[in-house]
Amino acid sequence: MIDTGASRRVAELMRETAAAELLPRFRNLSKEDVRQKRPGDIVTVADEAAEQRLASGLAKILPGVPVVGEEAVEKDPGLLGLIARPGEACWIVDPLDGTSNFAAGRDRFAIIVCLVQDRVATAGWILDVPRDRLAVAHRGGGVTFDGAAVRGEPTTEPLDGFVGYKIAKAFDEQLSPEYRARLGRITTLRCAGAEYLEILAGRANFSLYRVTKPWDHAAGTLMMREAGGGAVQFGNAPYMPAQPLNAGLIAASTGEALTEAKALLEASKMPLLAPRA
C-alpha cells in the first residue's frame, strides 16, 4: 500500500516534526505546558502539537486514510474502532512516546508511526528523537535500523529484557532460583519505542507489557517479526493492533528468545500476568 518514496516521506515528516515541535520544547516546558489526563498519565503541549503536524502530513502522503493518534483517542475513544475495520487502512500515531521522560528532561523519547491495512500492521517507523536513530519495517520486506538490515541474533541465556517495575519485582520474588538464573537484566526505559530499538540493536532480548496501547506497539511488534522473532498475547495468540488493551504482550527479535520468555512467564504463575476476562 505504501511505496519506497512514500515511506521516505513518512520518515522525513517524523524528523521535521521532531525538529519543529519536540526538540525546541525539550527541557524548556513551563508548568502550564504539562497537565494530567488522569492520575499518573500526563500530556504536554509538545504531544499535541506534534500529533497535529503528523496528522496533517500523513493525510497528504495517503489522502483519505484516517489517523488514530494517542491524543485524538483521548478526546474520542471511538477512533480505536478504525484499527479493527476489515479491509480498511489507518495510521496509528504516537507523537511523543515517553512523555513522562520528556517532561522530566530525560532523553528517552520517540515518535512512532504505523500503517495498518485490514487490521494488520503493514509498515512501521520508530524515531529515537534525541539520537536521531530511525528504524523502518515493511511487512514481508524486513526491518532496517539507520539504513542497515536487522536480523535477530541467536539467543543466549540469561535473557535481558524490558518489563515494568511491578512485574520485575514479582519475578524476583516468585521465580524459583533455577528459572530466575535464566533471566538476566530486566528494566524499563519508560518508552516503548526506545525499548524496541534497543532490542533491534542487540542490547536486549525481549519486552513484556501488561497494557498494549496500539500506538506504543503496532510498529515495534512488526519490527520484531521482520527481524525474525515475533509477538504474542499472554494467552499465546498472535499480537494484533486491535487486540484488547489488557491482552498483554511478549515480543522478541528471535523465535528462541520469544519461546524462552514465554516459558519464564509461565513458570512464574503470577495472577498479574493472567489474561483478564
Image (cartoon, rainbow, N blue to C red):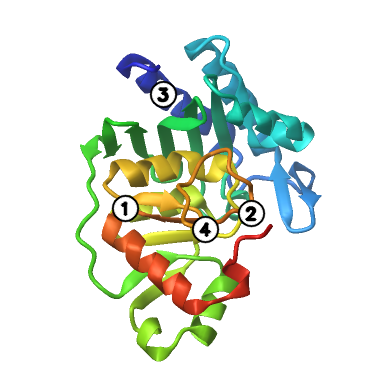
| Distance between the alpha carbons at the discs numbered 3 and 1 | 26 Å
Residue 263 percent across, percent down from the top left: 39, 70
Indicate which disc, 2 or 4, sits on the residue closer to the N terminus: 4
Question: Amino acid type of disc 2?
Answer: Asn
Judge whether 134 appears above or below 207 on screen.
above
| Marks 2 and 3 in Cβ contact (< 8 Å) | no
Which residue was labeled with disc 4? 235
**Residue 64 at least partly seen:** yes
In this rendering, the label closer to the viewer, 1 or 4: 4
Choose between 105 and 171: the one closer to the eye: 171
Indicate which disc, 1 or 4, sits on the residue closer to the N terminus: 4
Q: Residue at horizontal 35%, vertical 21%?
A: 8
In this rendering, the label closer to the viewer, 3 or 4: 4
Mark on residue 246? 2
Indicate which disc, 3 or 4, sits on the residue closer to the N terminus: 3
Which residue was labeled with disc 1? 253
Q: Residue at horizontal 79%, vertical 44%?
A: 32
Which residue was labeled with disc 3? 12
| Distance between the alpha carbons at the discs numbered 1 and 4 | 19 Å
| Distance between the alpha carbons at the discs numbered 2 and 4 | 11 Å
Indicate which disc, 2 or 3, sits on the residue closer to the N terminus: 3
Choose between 92 and 251: the one closer to the eye: 251
Question: Amino acid type of disc 4?
Answer: Gly
